[in-house]
Amino acid sequence: MAKSSSLNVRVVEGRALPAKDVSGSSDPYCLVKVDDEVVARTATVWRSLGPFWGEEYTVHLPLDFQQLAFYVLDEDTVGHDDIIGKISLSREAITADPRGIDSWINLSRVDPDAEVQGEICLSVQMLEDGRGRCLRCHVLQARDLAPRDISGTSDPFARVFWGSQSLETSTIKKTRFPHWDEVLELWEMPGAPSPLRVELWDWDMVGKNDFLGMVEFSPKTLQQKPPNGWFRLLPFPRAEEDSGRNLGALRVKVRLIEDRVLPSQCYQPLVELLMESVLGPAEEDTASPLALLEELTLGDCRQDLATKLVKLFLGRGLAGPFLDYLTRREVARTMDPNTLFRSNSLASKSMEQFMKLVGMPYLHEVLKPMISRVFEEKKYMELDPCKMDLGRTRRISFKGAPSEEQMRETSLGLLTGYLGPIVDAIVGSVGRCPPAMRLAFKQLHRRVKERFPKPEHQAVQSIGNLGQQLGQGKELWMAPLHPFLLQSVSRVRDFLDRLVDVDGDEEAGVPARALFPPSAIVREGYLLKRKEEPAGLATRFAFKKRYVWLSGETLSFSKSPEWQTRHSIPVSHIRAVERVDEGAFQLPHVMQVVTQDGAGALHTTYLQCKNVNELNQWLSALRKASAPNPDKLAACHPGAFRSARWTCCLQAERSAVGCSRTHSAVTLGDWSDPLDPDAEAQTVYRQLLLGRDQLRLKLLEDSNMDTALEADTGACPEVLARQRAAAARLLEVLADLDRAHEEFQQQEREKVALGPLGP
């Protein structure tokens, strides 16, 4: 039984943040960390003490993650960014409510003694001879310790306490991955049994030593099962501080989804029921199992369900019939054409997710050149007088602050200069739009035209009522753009009409193994690349700017996008994709791609990204692309082999086993996630479980109630009878899946009971 874990995180907004700048404001942004690894960074909101971010992330995680943390910082142009405060949420706190967390939480002060990370490896024995009882603590090594020194490393040593006695290991300089391999023996003193506490400290020549973390074991644990293995470091226990009132608060939404996924054959009856729903006659739409599933699903769960259903039907080559089925239901119950797809229905959510999953590469291909140009030119534009910052132009140009009218005219010129090429790119992209999307739009167009055929519905039939609302909204400061928009209306309407003018009424129906062919580019852009051995070049000259492409088959490099010569690495050769410590090259945002050649030798390619978000996106894309690869590395070196030793753990052998665990399971959820029919069917099963009681009630409704229900809902007795039959089939499938889950859980319990010596 496979296991999966996903964390849905939304950083909504902050309030009452303290001012960190001399202007009396702050420039806040938020870092999201999972077990001390940064997985996301929000945008910076300039000059605000009540910032709104509204950024959402899905993080796929290993099942053993411990903590989620949010750090709010003030961005500074010069010097280090100021830390405002943090929120820490344990795994237990997140899972306490199945619906997750959605609330304002006060920020707490960042205490260096509480900012611990990493693990320590110990082997403890309790011995006894004529002299008494002896505790032998073998301190082997530690990994991923917090960097306490300006160099990005630490000088760690361990201090062992048992009763009134204490002993220390030696200090190992400049490493976060120390290897001690030292045995410390402490003899029991008279009195009550004592716990064992092991503390790690960073040695400092000047000032006090810095705390790195601790572990503690009770007398009972020492006696019955002495520690042997890796243990997560913890902060000093202390009373909870409620200092958030002075540091402001952060509103976050967090939900953890954990699933145990059964083998494919267990889900086959459920999947077949769903497929029957969309392939059956139209008159049965309202009484199908899929219709009941929509009825049982609450609004806040529909987006997740829609994503899984779209992927499930895409994998079967039936996304078109699925969307057409939902469209038929949507238009049938819509009285006013202006409200079509405006509700939080499964149809609107599924169409939205379908366009994200199938159309994202198309969107990137069409708009990326202009969006990149906007970001590269960094020109300030603002038409809203309430948000206009006249001083910002002065800081950029050093020519003095313009008037509000000058700013408006300059911004209008820049905006129209950008919007023109954007509209040109969109209206000229019909041939590049994925055929599956065009067919879906054609079906939608046909169904709406059938439902609203009258002349007054002509605007709805032609896909859009573009331009009819100009000048009627609240944002009157947008009026200077109206001439440009009106000129573009006919071109955009023509584009939409050509988009649905496509041959073919149905998809091929061939099951898809993936959303995109293996040769499709899933990520590309400029990075700095360093060879494993740069032939003696200084570090800053060893990294060369290269354009990088990633597909499901290759990771390719060239000097520019137009350059004909490319060097490629087969994705199937990748064995690990990990971050690199900043101290390895004195550079931030570096990752490593470890590959294995035909002879079994390992090779490392180092790539530097522009910022932490780009780093996370590349890490995620590479890990997903290489997910099916065998023989993945369980550990690797987060440093580099330089000057005849590893910069991370100081080992002198290049072939030394890695000192840090790899993180192949940590990826960001997005449109490029691979299809996983079993995980998607498990989500549907979980949703049906929540509505099991409603299904039972529907099944128990007898025919005597049909007349009353017909009066209340407008459903005829035949439809109600079909609904009861569909409910019965769903309940039968649920019972079978319940039994399958229980059988696999029982097998897991038996394996745990047998232990490592079992068969």
Image (cartoon, grey):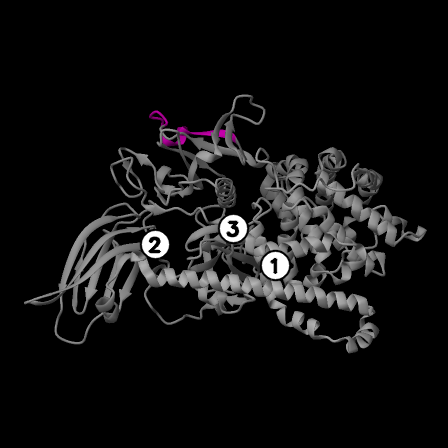
Residue visible at 83% across and 68% down in the picture: 716
In 3D space, how far apart are the residues under numbered discs 2 and 3 (Cα atoms)? 22 Å
Residue visible at 20% across and 56% down in the picture: 138
Return the residue nearer the eye: 395 or 312. 312
Q: Dot 1, how many residues are within 10 Å of its Cα: few (below 14), some (14-19), or many (20+)?
A: many
Foreground tag (2 vs 1): 1
Residue contact at pointers 3 and 1, CB within 8 angstroms: no
- For marks 3 and 1 on the same chain, the one whose residue lies earlier in the sequence: 3
The percent coordinates of residue 245 (x first, y second) are 49, 69
- For marks 2 and 3 on the same chain, the one whose residue lies earlier in the sequence: 3
- Say the numbered circle drawn on residue 118: 2
The percent coordinates of residue 380 (x first, y second) are 64, 43
Question: How many numbered marks have been drawn onto this rendered protein structure?
Answer: 3
Q: Dot 3, how many residues are within 10 Å of its Cα: few (below 14), some (14-19), or many (20+)?
A: many
Q: Residue 510: name its quadrant.
A: top right
* Residue 348 visible within the image: no
In 3D space, how far apart are the residues under numbered discs 3 and 1 (Cα atoms)? 32 Å
- Say the numbered circle drawn on residue 41: 3
Residue occupying the far left of the picture: 130
Report which residue position mark 1 lands on: 684
What span is colored magenta in the figure? 534-547
Say whether residue 423 is left or right of residue 667: right
Helix, strand or loop for disc 1: helix
Residue contact at pointers 2 and 1, CB within 8 angstroms: no
Say whether residue 354 is left or right of residue 260: right
